[in-house]
Amino acid sequence: MRGSYPGPQGKRKLRAQGNSRDGPAGGRISRMDGSPRAWRPSPLIRASLVLHAGAAGVTLLRPHWWPWTLSAVLADHLLLALSGLWPRSHLLGPNWTHLPPLAAGAGVATVPAAVAVTIDDGPEPQVTERVLEVLDAHGARATFFCIGERVERHPSIARAIVAAQHEIANHSYRHLKCFSLLGPRGVANEISRAQAVIAEATGEVARFFRAPAGLRNPFLEPALTRANLQLVSWTRRGFDTVSGSAGRVFGSLTRDLQGGDILLLHDGHAARTEAGAPVILEVLPRLLRALKAAQLAPITLRAALERTAAAPSAHSLASGATP
Ligand SMILES: [Zn+2]
């Protein structure tokens, strides 16, 4: 088991904590008030900045070396681009690929391990409501990474997500295929517009962001810090937008399942089974039964953050500590 993850002592407490913004010790989680955290460039970004400054200096002093300086800069850009195409990479900044570990002394021996079920690309009429029913029937909590313009179209579904004590999170405003090609303004716009419509529809300030298809660029992390959002990718995904085979999706999600895993499913853009049903509706009940059998409590990302420790842990997360 990868560390110990906080679960309440049974699901009763898990329900009670739900989307509460109060931490386990009654303290508010640091920066849950929306104040921005400081952007700290990752080592790769720092190295890139130094390289660009060095290349500019060399070009001024030794202009005839330009083929070498240009090659170095192009190689750096290639490395940055590749890092952004790798959704689970930590090279561009902090990125949750697992839940953060339980705080020391927070009842490690007595609480069950936890996982996060994250559901992307909704709200989707006729699907999200049924997903909520399945979650409710199993007493499970999930995090919904919603697309801003879909929240605008279906605010009542977004409200139903929050009313059922699940978490709503930011999955950009338009879910553009070219999201990772946007400049700083375009990236910030996608984030802030989605943040605004989620708040307007639900009254909730999203705390987590997932990039469309997980693809990013170096402009994302500064924009996330300004919006006080934590980037989340996943431990394992079911590829349920392309595979309509519930068995295959379930197998992908549960291979080497462990406490602390972040699992990815889709209510929007869901592939269909042979019978024509969105595959999530066949996979989710099976997954929740498997989690129960493995004694893994499905909790929201916010609940996982709240259980990590006292408020200063948010600082360590923001500084790039990999859970
Ligand atoms: Zn998506």
Image (spheres, rainbow, N blue to C red):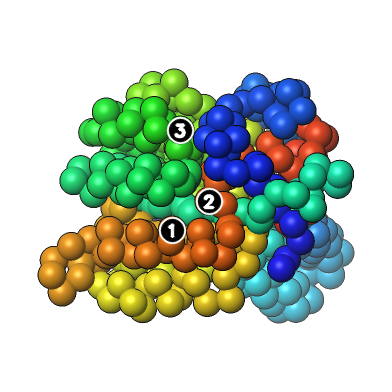
Q: Where's residue 241, x and y in %?
A: 31, 66
Q: Is mark 3 within 8 Å of ligand 1?
A: no
* Element under disc 1: helix
- Compared with 152, 103 (above or below) is below
Amino acid under disc 2: Pro
On residue 288, the disc is: 1
- Is mark 1 in CB contact (under 8 Å) with mark 2? yes
Name the residue nearer the viewer: 85 or 143: 143
- Quadrant in which the C terminus is drawn: bottom right
The quarter holding residue 44 reads bottom right
Task: Please report the residue visible at 55 percent of the width from the left and 36 percent of the height from the top.
Answer: 12
Measure how far apart labels 1 and 3 are at the Cα level. Answer: 17 Å
Q: Where's residue 231, x and y in %?
A: 59, 49
Q: Foreground mark, 1 or 3?
A: 1
The disc, 1 or 2, on the residue closer to the chain's N-terminal end is 1
On residue 165, the disc is: 3
Measure how far apart labels 1 and 2 are at the Cα level. Answer: 8 Å
The disc, 1 or 3, on the residue closer to the chain's N-terminal end is 3
Query: Which residue is disc 2 drawn over?
Result: 298
Measure how far apart labels 3 and 2 are at the Cα level. Answer: 12 Å
Q: Where's residue 117, x and y in %?
A: 48, 54
Label 2: few (<14), some (14–19) or many (≥20) C-alpha neighbours in 10 Å: many
The quarter holding residue 91 reads bottom right
Horizontal placement of 20 versus 134: left or right?
right
Amino acid under disc 1: Leu
**Residue 256 in sight from this viewpoint:** yes
Q: Where's residue 49, x and y in %?
A: 77, 56
* Element under disc 3: loop
